[in-house]
Image (cartoon, rainbow, N blue to C red):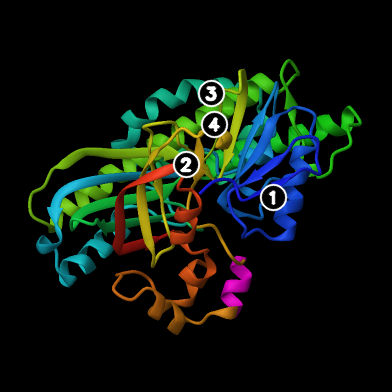
Amino acid sequence: MPIRQVFTEGAKPVKVWTDDIDARSQAQLINISTLPFIHHHVAAMPDVHLGIGATIGSVIATDKAIIPAAVGVDIGCGMAAARTSLTAEQIDEKALKKLFDQISRDVPVGRAQHKDDRALTTAAEPFAAPLKAMTDKHPQLLKAFGRFSNWVNQIGTLGGGNHFIEVCLDESNRVWVMLHSGSRGIGNAIGHYFIELARRDMERWMIQLPDRDLAYLPEGTEHFDDYVEAVSWAQAYARENRDQMMRLVLAALARHLPAFSVTEEVVNCHHNYVDRENHFGANVWVTRKGAIRAREGDLGIIPGSMGAKSYIVRGKGNPESFCSCAHGAGRRMSRTAAEKQFKPADLEAQTQGVVCRKDKGVLDEIPGAYKDIDQVMTNQSDLVEVVHTLKQVVCVKG
């Protein structure tokens, strides 16, 4: 389905792939489009919803500037998925419960981290020297890291919020592992640190913004190159975090299920990040805030909520979306609103058939708080094609 709406109130158009957008999200998108360095237009994916400064589900191409708050503080957050040779016939309800317990033991969730870093030292080694150089230049970052300074022990950990690990079945009853996480506390600290530097620069240069969270770093200024270096570090760290979690989860499956192999279909993609790309004849910075890259042939992952279907997709390379697509269902209501509206009985009903937590502690992640993933997929039929349809049977939440 092509673009559904175009907003023209700003300096550049905003092209939107859905009719389901609230007034506050629309205002955020228009605010972004007024900035002087926006390239060509702003794209809003069908899962678009309110964010901080920039809407989640937006794709922002910028010329010689980056907005740190648009990249966000969960730098490099994204998805990984692996298809196995296992089939539904090889797992029963007892095995699913064992998997839930094993994964919960092996992968720290929430604020927890690994107690012993020896197994993770090799994974951490490439990150150590660049991080030291970063903190030598910005010693305030060490204070910002706080309790996250032991970043080695965070590799292979899930975090909280909407992060998850799932065991799923596809349309052929093949077993998949799918997970969602990012750069953990250390990426959060890096994000907040540079957002604050950008705000101070705006104040120092007396630049008026429609929203203080749209403070930006122009190329050639004091902090720009340092931010690019730091955000690249965090994005690589997030990828390694997902790789290490995938290793741990597959090992958990190996303990309780018949011998299996991982097929060639392994997907790993960011959906909160910035990168240098060429669009509409120019080399620009592309920030995908809750969106994934969908160049022609790119494989991506679009998850639903903890009780809904998810999709492995192949990009169509649509230039109007800056070769991007949605990153998930997108929230329909805030976490607070979900906790007020729903009860554990609702969660039980909406996650029927899934081995997962069903207590009030995860009510904010109830499927009813999210948009309809199938409608999201319909709205972006010109951006991606579906390769596999997944349905979870185990879900471990952060």
- Tell me the residue that label 2 is attached to: 383
Residue at coordinates 74% horizontally, 49% vertically from top-left? 28
- Tell me the residue that label 4 is attached to: 319
Amino acid on which disc 1 is placed? Ile
Secondary structure at numbered mark 1: loop
Q: Does residue 27 appear left or right of residue 311 in this picture?
A: right
Percent position of residue 123, x then y: 34, 31
Instruction: Identify the mark nearer the N-term, 3 or 4.
Output: 3
What span is colored magenta in the figure? Answer: 334-340
Q: Residue 132 carries which label?
A: 3
Q: Residue 337 lies in magenta, yes or no?
A: yes
Residue at coordinates 32% horizontally, 50% vertically from top-left? 178
Secondary structure at numbered mark 2: loop
Percent position of residue 327, x then y: 48, 48
Most prominent secondary structure in the magenta stretch? helix
Instruction: Identify the mark nearer the N-term, 4 or 1.
Output: 1
Q: As rendered, which of 242 and 49 lies closer to the eye?
A: 49
Q: Residue 112 lies in magenta, yes or no?
A: no
Secondary structure at numbered mark 3: helix
Q: Where, by quadrant of the figure, is residue 205 drawn?
A: top right
Amino acid on which disc 4 is placed? Pro
Amino acid on which disc 2 is placed? Leu
Percent position of residue 139, x then y: 65, 28
Mark in the foreground, 4 or 1? 4
